[in-house]
Image (cartoon, rainbow, N blue to C red):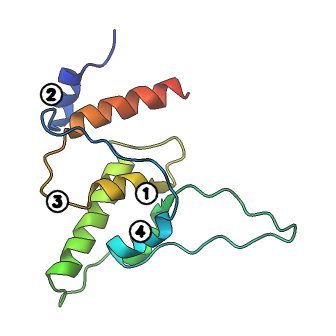
Amino acid sequence: MTVTLQDVSMITALPIEGKPLCMSTDSEGWRQQMEALIGMSPQEPEVEDGGKKDRVPAGAPFTWIAANFAHCPEDADDEVIQRYARVYMWYVISRTIFADGTGKSGPWMWLKALTVFDNKFSWGSAALAYLYRQVINC
């Protein structure tokens, strides 16, 4: 028995028709791209005494997202409102549909997918593919 695309559609109500959600998972320059999209990015980790940096996933810790985007300013213009909406959607899909085993950060690639609001992506297909990948990696 397995989860099918129809199951995903029925359970989550995510669209299964539309453009495939295909993008590069290359994380080169993700901090600069994040700053261009949402106006800021998490601090780079500090180098330990041995000169070796800890490996940090390409994305933002959920604590950082909540600390910086919990409340949209009341006098915000449309651009700022869209920025907060994009971050909120990124937070939600990273916590639910595209959750990873750590539960600590929102991967950069899902924020990148939210750059254009009116794209008609097949989010259900992406969710199923991600589920299968996570199961295989267990």
Residue type for callout 2: Met
Q: Which mark is residue 10?
A: 2
Q: Position of residue 104 (x, y in %)?
A: 52, 54
- Cα separation, mark 1 vs mark 4, equals 9 Å
Q: Residues within 10 Å of mark 2 (few under 14, many from 20)?
A: few
The N terminus is located in which quarter? top left
Determine whether label 1 and label 4 are within 8 Å by CB.
yes
Q: Earlier in the sequence, mark 1 or mark 3?
A: 1
What secondary structure is found at the residue carrying circle 3? loop
Residue type for callout 3: Phe
Q: Earlier in the sequence, mark 2 or mark 3?
A: 2
Q: Earlier in the sequence, mark 1 or mark 2?
A: 2
The residue closer to the viewer here, 37 or 23, is 23
Q: Which residue is mark 3?
A: 117
- Cα separation, mark 1 vs mark 2, equals 27 Å
Q: Residues within 10 Å of mark 3 (few under 14, many from 20)?
A: few
- Cα separation, mark 1 vs mark 3, equals 17 Å
Q: Looking at the image, can residue 7 be seen?
A: yes
The C terminus is located in which quarter? top right
- The residue that appears at 30% across and 53% down in the rendered structure is 113
Q: Position of residue 41 (x, y in %)?
A: 47, 73
Q: Looking at the image, can residue 69 be seen?
A: no
Write down the quadrant of residue 35 in the picture. bottom left
